[in-house]
Amino acid sequence: MAVVVVIDASAAYLRRQGLDNLADGAALYGADLGSSGIYEQGLDADRLLQQEAAVEAAVREYLGRAAAGSTFPGIEVAVDVDPVGRSVTVRLRAPLELPLSIPGAPDSTVVGASSTAAVTIQPG
């Protein structure tokens, strides 16, 4: 039984690491491309203001280019834009089929990851 636990825990860890990397990239890409329109709003803060529709589109584009749907079948994506903190948070969840199973264990396992990013203005 210990071997089953170690193998399943390793599979879940590797899956989460993959989702972590994907969430990091998507949040950075969304924060960067979601900052469009900054010149109309000015640069009045340390962080750029995000436009929700642009962030959502950028995150979806990034995940499409990364083939997230085929790498993580059943992936769920949530994108949040914080207008106060001027940041983007991407949350990913994907089902995981464990390599081995223990009788009585849950039938389905879901692994998740999240990442937050912002574009910070550095004075010249």
Image (tube, grey):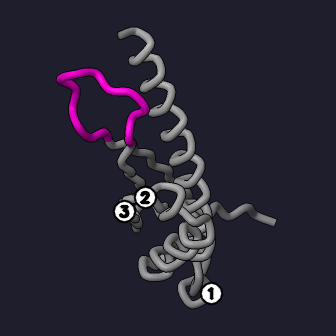
Q: Residue at x 38, y 51 (%)?
A: 93
Q: Amino acid at mark 1?
A: Tyr
Between residue 9 and residue 118, name the one nearer to us: 9
Q: Is residue 6 magenta?
A: no
Q: Which mark is residue 73?
A: 2
Task: Report the residue that reaches farthest toward the bottom.
Answer: 40
Q: Which residues are magenta?
A: 97-109
Q: Is residue 100 magenta?
A: yes
Q: Which mark is residue 78?
A: 3
The dominant secondary structure in magenta is loop
> Rounded to the nearest whole Å, what is the CA distance between mark 3 and mark 2?
16 Å
Q: Which tag is nearer the camera, tag 3 or tag 1?
A: 3
Q: Which mark is residue 39?
A: 1
Give the vertical position of 123 relative to 44 (above or below): above
**Considering the image in quadrants, where does the N terminus appear?**
top left
Of the image marks 3 and 1, the number of the one nearer the N terminus: 1
Q: Amino acid at mark 2?
A: Pro
Mark 1 residue crowding within 10 angstroms, few (<14) / some (14–19) / many (20+)? few
Q: Are marks 2 and 1 in contact (CB under 8 Å)?
A: no
Q: Which mark is residue 15?
A: none
